[in-house]
């Protein structure tokens, strides 16, 4: 029995009749002639807490529990889901799923084939964390956020504070006709604090958020493991005050040093979504489009400069997309997506892998709840640092006129993941290798291959940070998935920078 480094699976989930339900569903699917069947029981718990100026404003604690079955019958998909955890319901899922496959078969233009995968027997995996966030009393959580809010409100530049905490626990049982049985549990947290300054005369306001990314950790992340909250909160009011006095950016082409707290989102939109094979093949087009990175360019397309090395994985510790096995029973792994600037890999599920002759999937099938069938979803897609690369300060020292971009904010990208525009939480003018104070109202604009081709240098391992989001959207009906993106600081030459204030005025 395999196991992750985290704690045990919740006992009350293990007490459910998981194997009895799986046996009933899979046996009936076999009797009906399904060539492939995968059964899941999934429990998803979400807890939200929000404070406005130190007072609890929103709170919620929701749990969803259900079971589902997906089949391949006569070369067509079928799927059914329910909420009643009894053997009769489980068996009926097979009848419903096979009936759907029969109805849809005449409409299908091609037969469903799946890439092969070894059978893993009965395995378990749990994500690494120290303190279950759901075991911490709500009053203790509120007290911590209240104390931090009050600390920030004590500064004269801070007029309002919004503090938010989101925790998720995802527990899944999977079994298929081949004999793989997985039981897994993932815990993740997303804390965020925003400070606001309001100018009484003009009514203009400025806001600034903490940079702490969401993480596959527990409550310990809020109390100092993995992030220095005291240091960040101590400097946040002064950074906000500086921005209220900052001039608008000077528009034009200049060099960019992009901090990991901003660059992760550019990676997500221009590389993560751009290298999903279902988009490249046109199977995903209705929601956020396809991609310029079509299959015919695999192995030859230049995605960026020679210092660009991007990997996909579902195995990095504390990654939001990290798990032991995906929702098709595939053992997760790590692989290359861009190697020395050349596009060399895609993100795959079993069907996409079979369509283009890949030996196996790289474990990118995921369903956000038992009510959804798995679809190909994003892995942890990360830009690798240079082993002996420079510090952020050394990257800045190599810039005569430029901009340091810190923290993510708004973004826009076209339906082929090609033309884009990103803003940031903080921008600093760089003059002759030194920071020359904050600027505001900035955005950087480029095309995906041009932007990554302009990347002259990436920072060393000391600059690397694992960022990410709880809320990556895809599919219709829409599903959301958590995903991390690691990256170092990086230097880009001659990127177009806009003044958003000038654009608004125009």
Image (cartoon, helix red, strand yellow):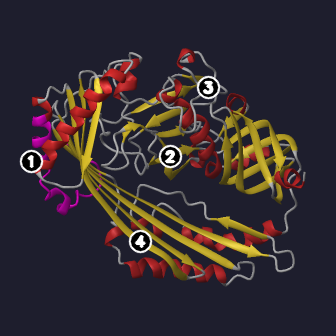
Q: Position of residue 67 (x, y in %)?
A: 23, 49
Looking at the image, do the residues carrying marks 2 and 3 touch, with CB atoms under 8 Å apart? no
| Residue topped by disc 4 | 60
Looking at the image, do the residues carrying marks 1 and 2 touch, with CB atoms under 8 Å apart? no
- Position of 226 with respect to 439 (left or right) is left
Query: Which of the 4 image quarters holds residue 1?
Result: top left
| Residue topped by disc 1 | 20
Disc 2, SS: strand
- Considering only vertical position in the picture, is 152 above or below 124? below
| Residue topped by disc 2 | 473
Looking at the image, do the residues carrying marks 2 and 4 touch, with CB atoms under 8 Å apart? no
Question: From mark 3 to mark 4, how far is it between C-alphas?
Answer: 41 Å
Query: Magenta segment, which residues?
Result: 1-28
Question: From mark 1 to mark 4, how far is it between C-alphas?
Answer: 33 Å
Q: Position of residue 189 (x, y in %)?
A: 44, 61
Decide which of 66, 501 is in the foreground and name it: 66
Looking at the image, do the residues carrying marks 3 and 4 touch, with CB atoms under 8 Å apart? no
Q: Position of residue 393 (x, y in %)?
A: 72, 50
Q: Residues within 10 Å of mark 4 (few under 14, many from 20)?
A: few
Looking at the image, do the residues carrying marks 1 and 3 touch, with CB atoms under 8 Å apart? no
Give whichever of discs 2 and 4 has the lower sequence position: 4
Question: From mark 2 to mark 3, how far is it between C-alphas?
Answer: 19 Å
Give whichever of discs 1 and 4 has the lower sequence position: 1
Q: Which mark is residue 292?
A: 3
Disc 1, SS: helix
- Position of 44 with respect to 258 (left or right) is left
Disc 4, SS: strand
């Amino acid at each position: 029995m395999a196991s992750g480094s985290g704690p045990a699976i919740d006992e009350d989930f293990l007490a459910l009749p998981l194997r009895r339900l799986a046996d009933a569903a899979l046996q009936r699917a076999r009797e009906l002639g399904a060539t492939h069947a995968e059964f899941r029981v999934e429990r998803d718990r979400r807890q939200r807490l929000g404070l406005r100026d130190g007072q609890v404003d929103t709170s919620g604690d929701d749990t969803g529990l259900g079971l589902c079955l997906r089949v391949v019958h006569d070369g067509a998909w079928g799927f059914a889901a329910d909420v009643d955890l009894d053997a009769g319901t489980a068996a009926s899922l097979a009848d419903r799923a096979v009936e759907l496959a029969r109805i849809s078969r005449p409409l299908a233009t091609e037969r469903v084939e799946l890439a092969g995968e070894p059978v893993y027997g009965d395995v378990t995996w749990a994500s690494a964390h120290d303190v279950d966030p759901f075991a911490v009393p709500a009053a203790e959580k509120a007290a911590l956020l209240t104390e931090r809010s009050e600390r920030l409100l004590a500064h004269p530049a801070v007029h309002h504070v919004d503090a938010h905490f989101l925790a998720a626990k995802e527990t899944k049982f999977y079994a298929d006709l081949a004999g793989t049985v997985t039981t897994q549990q993932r815990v993740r947290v997303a804390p965020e604090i925003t400070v606001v300054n309001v100018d009484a005369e003009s009514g203009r306001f400025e806001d600034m958020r903490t940079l702490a990314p969401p993480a596959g950790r527990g409550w310990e992340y809020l109390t100092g493991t993995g992030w220095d909250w005291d240091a960040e909160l101590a400097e946040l009011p002064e950074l906000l005050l500086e921005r209220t006095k900052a001039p608008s950016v000077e528009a034009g082409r200049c060099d960019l040093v992009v901090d990991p707290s901003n660059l992760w989102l550019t990676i997500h939109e221009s590389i993560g979504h751009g290298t999903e094979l279902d988009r490249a093949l046109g199977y995903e087009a209705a929601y956020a489009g396809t991609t310029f990175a079509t299959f015919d360019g695999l192995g030859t397309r230049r995605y960026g400069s020679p210092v660009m090395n991007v990997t996909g994985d579902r195995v990095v510790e504390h990654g939001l997309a990290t798990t032991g096995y995906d929702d098709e029973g595939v053992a997760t792994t790590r692989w290359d997506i861009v190697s020395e600037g050349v596009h060399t890999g895609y993100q795959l599920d079993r069907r996409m892998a079979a369509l283009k002759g890949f030996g196996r999937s790289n474990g990118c099938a995921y369903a956000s709840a038992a009510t959804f069938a798995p679809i190909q979803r994003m892995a942890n897609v990360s830009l690798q640092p240079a082993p002996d690369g420079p510090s952020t300060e050394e990257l800045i020292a190599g810039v005569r006129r430029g901009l340091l971009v810190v923290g993510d904010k708004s973004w826009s990208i076209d339906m082929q993941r090609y033309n884009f525009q990103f803003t940031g939480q903080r921008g600093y003018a760089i003059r002759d290798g030194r920071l020359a104070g904050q600027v505001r109202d900035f955005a950087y604009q480029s095309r995906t291959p041009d932007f990554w081709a302009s990347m002259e240098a990436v920072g060393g391992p000391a600059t690397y940070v694992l960022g990410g989001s709880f809320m990556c959207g895809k599919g219709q009906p829409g599903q959301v998935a958590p995903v991390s993106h690691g990256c170092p600081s990086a230097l880009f030459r001659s990127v177009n920078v806009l003044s958003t204030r000038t654009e608004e005025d125009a």
